[in-house]
Amino acid sequence: MTIHQSAEDYLETILMLTERQGKVRSIDVVNELGFTKASVSIAMKKLRENGYIAVDGEGSLTLLPPGQEIAERIYSRHRLLTHFFVQLGVDEKTAAEDACKAEHILSEQTLEKIRERARLTDAEAACQKTDGAE
């Protein structure tokens, strides 16, 4: 089944909120994304019906294995791209916003090359710090 960018964003948001605060409810997603309650409610219903999330009796959202897998993949891309853009000199806020847009469309090949370049840049920066400390 093909999952749309908006669904990926919702799953990623649920993962991020879960890591940050433990329990997550739809209202937390509303507050995080700035969408209407109605929009988030419809999205949560679709995600639940498609087996990506579960909702308990108290309204807490839990990622099910397929949703967890997608959320982790997208969040990993987001962190990599944000880090890489910051390395390029982009401010943190803009880097995160741009990463959010790019995380859905870049191929695995491109992401792997970015990963390699980011590791190389990190290693170069570490060497420069070590050289400068002597």
Image: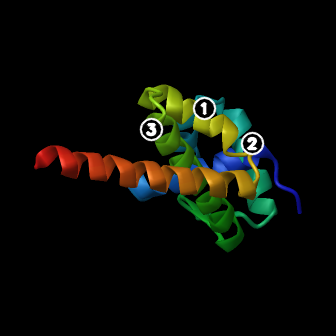
Q: Residue at x 81, y 63 (%)?
A: 50
**Residue annotated with mark 2:** 6
Q: Nearer the viewer, residue 84 or 19?
A: 84
- Estimate the x, y position of residue 13 in percent, counting from the top left: 57, 47
Q: Is residue 129 left or right of 33 when viewed as pictured? A: left
**Residue annotated with mark 3:** 87
Inspect the image, locate mark 1, and give the three-letter code of the amino acid beneath it.
Asp
Inspect the image, locate mark 2, and give the three-letter code of the amino acid beneath it.
Ser
Q: Nearer the viewer, mark 2 or mark 3?
A: 3
Q: Nearer the viewer, residue 23 or 113?
A: 113
Labels 3 and 1: the sequence-earlier one:
3
- Estimate the x, y position of residue 86 in percent, counting from the top left: 45, 35
Labels 2 and 1: the sequence-earlier one:
2
Q: Residue at x 82, y 54 (%)?
A: 3
Q: Nearer the viewer, mark 3 or mark 1?
A: 3
Inspect the image, locate mark 3, and give the three-letter code of the amino acid beneath it.
Gln
Check disc 3 and report its element: helix, strand or loop: helix
Q: How many marks?
A: 3
Q: Residue at x 51, y 42 (%)?
A: 84
* In contact (CB < 8 Å): disc 3 and disc 1: no
* In contact (CB < 8 Å): disc 2 and disc 1: no
**Residue annotated with mark 1:** 98
